[in-house]
Amino acid sequence: MVKSSAESLLSVINDILDFSKVEAGKMEFEQTAFDLYDLLGEMTRSLSYRAHQKNLELLHDIRSDVPLQLMGDPGRLRQVLVNLIGNAIKFTDRGEVMVTVTREADRPDGVMLHFVVNDTGPGIPLEKRRVIFEPFAQADDSTQRKFGGTGLGLTISSRLIAMMGGDIRVETGADGQGSAFHFTACFGLHGEQLLKPVSMPVRRLSGLRLLIVDDNATNRRLLVKVLRKWSIEAVAAEGGQEALDILRERAAGPDAMRLILLDSQMPGMDGFETAQRIREDLRLNIPVILLRSMGSSGDAARRRKAGIHSYLNKPLRQEELLAAICEAVGTAAANVPAPAEIAGYARKAGAPLRVLLAEDNPVNRTLAIRLLEREGYQLIVACDGREALTAFEANSFDLALVDIQMPEMDGFEVTAAIRHHEAQHGGHLPIVAMTAHAMKGDAEHCLASGMDGYVSKPIIAGRLFEEIENVLAATNTRISS
């Protein structure tokens, strides 16, 4: 309750500060280069933990003609999207939240993009659709008591969108259910617009017969579209029993499936049971890639028993999906890094991750220890920077979690000493900063100092483990290349 109240208070303060900047005309906008594909992928990953807690699917789709290398303020775009997607998750109890990006119009100085955030929650009555964009207003008087908030989120978002040269509106389904928030924004184009490697057909996968098993129709549709772009012959099933029927029919013929993408959470027969029955009942040895929600853990024993080849976290990123498919069928894909989730599966199935934890605050230290030990990691704990450096010199680690503010040596000094040692002796220890600093530029400062990742306090389990997986994936990619 204390944690929830503190987060609510922090949200209120941030909203009021942003609103006051907008009203005073002091809201600053940057013009910097960014990749829309990476921004949307990272942002939906960060929100997927909240969606998973409500058993919601969080999906995104960038249409093929949308330019990805843009000039603008990625932080403000992220702020708008986080607000709209966060609201959609908050007010949706079942179903899905979908983000779609299309190309609205070309402009002399760039492009106007059209974003849509759809949900399957309750619709917004016509008389309330304009009110919700006014300061301190919400669609229902009971909303604030149930969900909290200031009623400023949509107001701030609408002002930010106007400053990006666009506008915002909301629609509700014909049956009064589901909301769709549409907004446009203008961006410049940066450099040569190259297609992502995953957007080009992979010749060696052409004709591969693959079975998708997922109870969510939107997810099936998006997966089929992506796979067909790679010339993969994809067949979709909405449940375990239908998947077994398809596999049984095709087992002995020329159309036999060579790979299965299997959702872990399905009604009736879940992914684990389906995979186990494929092996026990049908006697088929087809590689299975499990699609699981971000934040799921503790399923290593079930994966081994069911014979799962590897797993991917939702929402899926195309380059990770392609790498997993290539790895499963024994095909090398040029310039495609191995996905973090495959590496994560190998670690949990084998030796536990060895982590150096450097934290001087006893409360934060206890929390981090509990979270990491619960995931099965092996820890060596240091109470200050000098202890951390001594532990590094005496042991080998897979990862270091380092607090920025510590006595004796702070986190930056510890990182500098480790990087100096590595320059002389080789190797690279992934280092994730843990800090109460959450101001603009702090993340960049940590990365510039030689750290690989950054999590702000108070520590949130889902964000911590997501950052660990991202950092380890980047390190594995760098080493392999």
Image (spheres, helix red, strand yellow):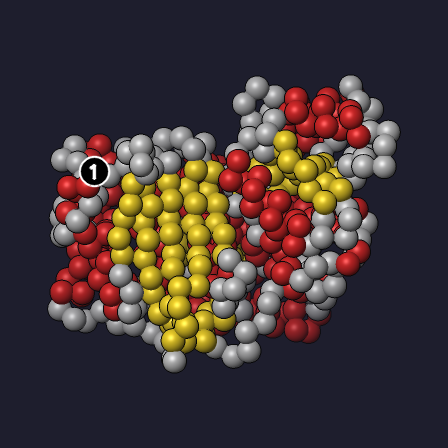
Residue at (24% x, 65% y) in the render: 162
State whether residue 411 appears in this view.
Answer: no
Q: Name the residue under label 1.
A: 125
- Say which quadrant the N terminus sits in: top left
Label 1 packing within 10 angstroms: few (<14), some (14-19), many (20+): some
The one of 370 and 274 positioned closer to us in this rendering: 274
Residue type of the residue flagged with mark 1: Pro
* Residue at far front of view: 174
For residue 431, above or below residue 246: below
Horizontal side of residue 449 vs 220, given as left or right: left
Q: Residue at x 22, y 32 (%)?
A: 146
Residue, x 32% and y 38% (percent of image)?
A: 173
When the figure is inspected, residue 297 is found, relative to residue 388, above or below; the finding is above
Q: Residue at x 51, y 40 (%)?
A: 218
Whole-percent x, y for residue 385 in the image: 48, 60
Mark 1 secondary-structure assignment? loop
Left/right placement of residue 44 relative to residue 328 reads: left
Residue 421 visible here: yes
Horizontally, residue 151 falls left or right of residue 93, namely: left
> Which quadrant is the C terminus positioned in?
bottom right
> Which one is in front, 12 or 257?
257
Residue 350 placed where, x, y %?
A: 72, 39
| Figure check: 129 above or below 332 | above
Residue 180: name its quadrant: top left
How far from the left and from the top, in percent, is residue 6? 25, 43
